[in-house]
Image: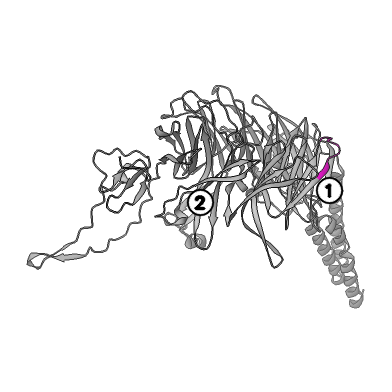
Amino acid sequence: MNRKTGIIGIALSLVMAFAPLTYAQEEPRFYLMRFNEMFEDTVFKVQLIFVTDEHARAELLKNYYDKVKEREDFWLKVNQEKNAPPGELKQFKSYGELQRFLKDRTNYYYDKVDANTQRLGIATQTAMEAASAEGGGQEFSLTNVQVAGVDEPDIAKTDGTYIYTVTGGKVYISKAYPPEDASILSELLPAENEYIRDIFVNNDKLVVFSQSFGYRIYDKTVLQPAEGRASDSRIAASPTIVDYGTPQSYIKVYDIHDRENPTLAREITASGDYFDARMIGDYVYAVVNMPLYPYTSPSSVPLPVVDGEETPANAIYYFDIPDYSYNYVTVLSLNTQNDAEQHNSKTFLTGYSQDMYVSAGNMYVTYANMMEQQEKTLVHKIALSNGAIEYRNYGTVPGTVLNQFSMDEHNVYFRIATTTNSFSEPSNNVYVLDSSMKLVGKLENMAPGERIFSVRFLGDRAYLVTFVRIDPLFVIDLNDPARPALLGELKVPGVSDYLHPYDENHLIGVGRATEEHDGFVTFSGLKLSLFDVSDVSNPKELSSYEVKDGYSEAINDHKAFLFSREKNLLVLPVSVYSAESFWQGAYAFGLSLDNGFDLKGKITHADDSADYWMQPSIRRSLYIDNVLYTVSDRMIQMHNLGTMEKLNAVAFLQPEPLPEPITVPAPLPSEPIEGGVEKPTQPPAAPRPPENTFCIQVIQPARNPETGECKEFPTPCDVPEDWEPVDSCNGPAM
């Protein structure tokens, strides 16, 4: 073989080698592998040109043919998996089988997905009313949840007498009703390196969910390089270094029959990230994700630990489904009212849980599977009953979900809305699955080129909002599960990120207003909408309200949304940003079909004397009888619902200030005295609280008698001696 023929052969082989790329375009997950095969084939052909020794050429050919046989076996296995029926729930027989499963899977996947970048989005339904505990108000708001009777954890809860809040890294228990007796009763502190996420309240039990981040921080000054080793450049560049480990999740149940002295009744720990939870009756169900992505060696696969006990490999369930990354998903249950009842848990090896929908009897946990040409969502159905956890089945639908409101269960059918992302443009779909998670109906390719921004399933209808330049609201008929049908649509400026039922024929939308400049659409502020869907073929926007440069946490977190149709009340946190100013607080509206949005008042916890980035932010609002409570990281404030008059405020205990750095003090200025000797000028003494004043954590208004200025102080001890305490800045002195 001469050189010229060899070069021509190389060129031809390159052309032929690119042929598999057509297949790679159809299967993006294997692009790198096909490219690597192309490169190996080309190298082999080049080697054949220059290797002339017969023995060396024979060895080269043998190695190449062995490699080709390995490829064929691999692609045969891939094709078998691709064409195989849906995987069934299995259990590993041994730790070795678990190791082999992960080793086989990770061998032919190049990418590892960072599970910490996949987080859930959460939403809820309407605030409900219930009879209160003895001594409290007759009616009070509950957390805005998606499914009636299925409670969701939050950072603020009330039982009609007390308010329980997560703020400043602590849990506070406050007497709330009647408002004139409001006070902080107790606080619960997290353990070191522990972060409190949210809470449940059930009778005299408080359930606290917290998490440690799985790392330890060291001061570089105490870390010296070992003898003979160079100093670590990471330590030289930073004052601290971080040692990462497995995060831990904690479920702590407190007995709060004495609200001033809560006691820890039980605690359950689980290795991994706390994902989300629900409470049905007396039972709490929590989901914990333990990603396996930090562990690269299949010989040291970690096992999940629940309540101090390692889960054996033969107790872990799995599905023979290819994926980029694997995670332990542990579902835990416990009885909040019976501390002696053993908790229950089951662990599954799946993809990373991304969203969760829970009905009164089933939990649906989803994650995206990117192993096919078109991304898909896997939905696992788990039955829940009085603490029992039983896996039922799973289904697969094209596309990905937005959040928990993209899913719903109705009359044994599971409905789900997704957005598919093809190489050309996205489109939107609604799928219906039966009780065994088999597809029975679908409505596809809605609003091509747009994406879902909000979904709400209500009975036999679904309401879906997509957006790219304008907000189409779609009304979908699901009365026949096998034949979902588009009934009507409405196009209005802006977009609704959260939909909430006003009644069976009207919807409230919370989202963003838009403006168009030079052909581009930009968000310009907060927008509220009231939609009339009584005529499904011709939905209308009855009323709207916009806040220029405004934003609300309720756009992304439904638990910040407070609504009561009976009280004609809508309250949500609002932030207004502009080049000239910043304002944060809560907007309280009256809302009716006749009058639309009627702004009743604005409430803020801000202090005009502080910088805006240091101001407290109102995050939640609640009501007890006719009193509106707003909660920020600094206080609980109370207002009359009818007049919006401020009634009282209770300040949370402020955390201890961090110690100041040790510095050498500068010399004090001096003043001459007799004899020419100088003495230091002493700094002024710190102000002292008024005598006979009890320093409780209650906001105290006071007025300066000389200037007439009136302001609120964090405690009575902070009132200057020459100021006069008053009931309010609008009332006379006490």
Query: With respect to residue 132, does 72 lie above or below?
Result: below
Residue 418 or residue 604, whichever sits in front: 604
Query: With respect to residue 473, does 566 lie above or below?
Result: above
Q: Is residue 198 left or right of residue 135?
A: right
Query: Which element is circle 1 on?
Result: helix
Image quadrant assignment for residue 458 = top right
Is residue 351 visible in the rendered structure shown here? no
In the rendered structure, which segment of residues is drawn in magenta? Answer: 479-487
Q: Position of residue 161 (x, y in %)?
A: 47, 29
Q: Amino acid at mark 1?
A: Val
Residue situated furthest bottom in the rendering: 4
Q: Position of residue 268 (x, y in %)?
A: 55, 32
Which residue occupies 85% across, 72% down?
A: 50
Residue 78, disc: 1
Which is in the foreground here, disc 2 or disc 1?
2
Disc 2 to disc 1: CB gap under 8 Å: no
Q: Is residue 353 left or right of residue 549?
A: right
Marks 2 and 1, Cα distance to the nearest angstrom? 55 Å
Residue situated furthest left in the rendering: 675
Residue 106 or residue 370, whichever sits in front: 370
Residue 584, disc: 2
Query: Which element is circle 2 on?
Result: strand
Image quadrant where one finds the N terminus: bottom right
Q: Is residue 548 left or right of residue 264?
A: right
Residue 733 or residue 195, whichever sits in front: 733
Q: Amino acid at mark 2?
A: Gln
Image quadrant assignment for residue 327 = top right
Q: Position of residue 730 (x, y in %)?
A: 38, 45
